[in-house]
């Protein structure tokens, strides 16, 4: 029985509620008056329930879809401006005891060489990422209690934070590892992680169990209830996501929104981020073998709906997607993207991109500098900001500021300051020239005269060699 406040997965992610929601929405798919009323509600930037969003998802009216796209752009700009935060994944180990049929790291795969980075290798990978200009990482590791215990993850986080190369420093380490215990989440919190990320893969329980036939990840409830344990362990920034293509996309969207509603109802704060990966080719993995793949237009609709239904959340699109697809999604609500990514264990320390340990094919293979310049050409401000985390503006404090629109007083100048650091330390001449012009323009758009003045002074200090100013 559906209960948004329950801590049991089979109650806050009730299968029958999802089916009833989809049936209810399908019966109203041609109700344009209702659809426009829901879009009016969304325009107030208070979000939509999973049932309301399902109605818009089922609607095929061109005018409804057009307004939905326009509204998602308006809401994204209202909350996040033109800033796009950049990060990179860092794969520590591909040892895994699970049997996930869509992932090449599954334990039955005998083709892929297994590798686990030593702490010295992690330090070299971190230095390579710093040399690119990154300030924010998301560490990834397969689930293996022998090769990748929590102690290894904690030591790796400490190593990453400890690397200093020229002006390079990693200021925020997000963590994407398997569901674990409250005690281990407390240890991750004490290690000063940023966001804890865990993709659900699919919310459909029967499909989930079939896709995860072996290993601890087979336990649907343990996995689905992980965010509640993480928050109980003191981690107040968590990131959700499904792997589109594994199950019917309408089912997944409703489940994703129900999960966000559950976190808000129980913990007073919804997901800090929502990721929207689609299944991609990899060693032994053919996306065509999965019957629920989605095209680019449907993908755009899903992104727009997530933005208007959960207006406060950060939205992430990775290098799984091509530059063209990412360009299409940026104005529909995306606020974070990866750049210069390698999905191999130890891939950053090699000149040539290795493919033998990739978790998935990377569609956008441009360098970080190229991605930064591309974003600026599209009118966005590339940001390497980590200030909110470092100033303890996380969890409900961050959400209150974001929902009130006050976070803009911090984020806009911080984006310019971190972009200036990148331009001074890592950018190619063409990128530096374009970035300086962008900063000059955007500086004038900061509404507060005091903030504008302090930002200008800090920019000058960065140009003179100082680093790490923040609001």
Image (cartoon, rainbow, N blue to C red):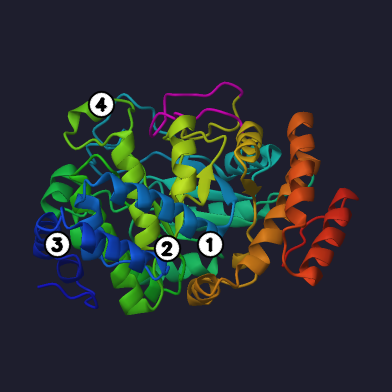
Residue drawn where x is 48% and y is 35% of the image: 345
Q: Position of residue 201 (x, y in %)?
A: 27, 48
Any mark on residue 78, and which? 1
Query: Sequence-wise, which precedes: disc 1 or disc 2?
Result: 1
Q: Is residue 222 visible in the rendered structure shown here? A: no
Secondary structure under the numbered disc 4 in the rendered image:
loop
Give the left or right position of residue 358, taking residue 48 as reference: right
Q: Position of residue 140 (x, y in %)?
A: 45, 46
Query: Sequence-wise, which precedes: disc 3 or disc 2?
Result: 3
Q: Position of residue 13 (x, y in %)?
A: 19, 65
Image quarter hosting the N terminus:
bottom left
Question: CA gap, disc 1 to disc 2?
Answer: 9 Å
Q: Are marks 1 and 2 in contact (CB under 8 Å)?
A: yes
Please state which of residues 269 and 106 is positioned toward the viewer in this rendering: 269
Query: Sequence-wise, which precedes: disc 3 or disc 4?
Result: 3
Secondary structure under the numbered disc 3 in the rendered image:
helix
Please state which of residues 128 and 35 is positioned toward the viewer in this rendering: 35
Q: Which residue is mark 3?
A: 21
């Amino acid at each position: 029985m559906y209960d948004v406040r329950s801590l049991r997965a089979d109650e806050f992610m009730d299968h029958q509620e999802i089916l009833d929601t989809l049936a209810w929405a399908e019966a109203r798919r041609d109700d344009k008056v209702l659809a426009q009323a829901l879009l009016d509600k969304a325009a107030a930037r208070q979000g939509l329930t999973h049932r309301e969003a399902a109605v818009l998802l089922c609607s095929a009216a061109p005018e409804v879809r057009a307004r939905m796209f326009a509204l998602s752009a308006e809401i994204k700009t209202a909350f996040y401006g033109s800033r796009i935060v950049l990060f990179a994944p860092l794969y520590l180990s591909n040892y895994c005891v699970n049997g996930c049929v869509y992932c090449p790291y599954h334990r039955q795969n005998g083709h892929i060489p297994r590798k686990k980075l030593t702490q010295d290798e992690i330090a070299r990978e971190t230095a390579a990422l710093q040399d690119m200009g990154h300030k924010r990482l998301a560490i990834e590791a397969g689930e293996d209690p022998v090769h990748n215990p929590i102690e290894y993850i904690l030591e790796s986080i400490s190593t990453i934070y400890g690397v200093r190369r020229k002006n390079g420093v990693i200021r925020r380490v997000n963590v994407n590892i398997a569901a674990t215990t409250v005690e281990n989440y407390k240890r991750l919190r004490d290690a000063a992680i940023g966001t804890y990320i865990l993709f659900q893969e699919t919310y459909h329980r029967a499909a989930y169990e079939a896709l995860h036939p072996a290993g601890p990840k087979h336990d649907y409830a343990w996995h689905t209830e992980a965010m509640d344990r993480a928050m109980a362990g003191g981690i107040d920034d968590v990131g959700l996501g499904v792997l589109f293509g594994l199950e019917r996309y309408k089912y997944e969207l409703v489940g994703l929104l129900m999960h966000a509603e559950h976190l808000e109802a129980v913990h007073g704060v919804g997901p800090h981020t929502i990721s929207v990966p689609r299944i991609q080719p990899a060693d032994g993995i053919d996306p065509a073998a999965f019957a629920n793949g989605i095209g680019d237009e449907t993908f755009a609709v899903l992104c727009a709906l997530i933005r208007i239904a959960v207006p406060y959340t950060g939205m992430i699109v990775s290098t799984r997607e091509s530059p063209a697809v990412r360009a299409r999604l940026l104005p529909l609500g995306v606020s974070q993207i990866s750049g210069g990514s390698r999905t191999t264990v130890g891939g950053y320390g090699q000149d040539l991109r290795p493919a033998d340990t990739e978790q998935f094919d990377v569609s956008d293979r441009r360098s970080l500098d190229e991605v930064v310049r591309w974003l600026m050409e599209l009118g966005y401000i590339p940001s390497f900001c980590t200030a909110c985390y470092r100033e303890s503006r996380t969890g409900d404090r961050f959400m209150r500021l974001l929902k009130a629109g006050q976070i803009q007083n911090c984020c806009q100048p911080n984006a310019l300051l971190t972009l200036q650091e990148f331009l001074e330390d890592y950018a190619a001449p063409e990128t530096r020239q374009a970035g300086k012009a962008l900063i000059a323009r955007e500086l004038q758009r900061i509404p507060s005269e005091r903030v504008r003045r302090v930002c200008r002074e800090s920019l000058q200090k960065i140009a003179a060699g100082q680093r790490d100013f923040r609001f």
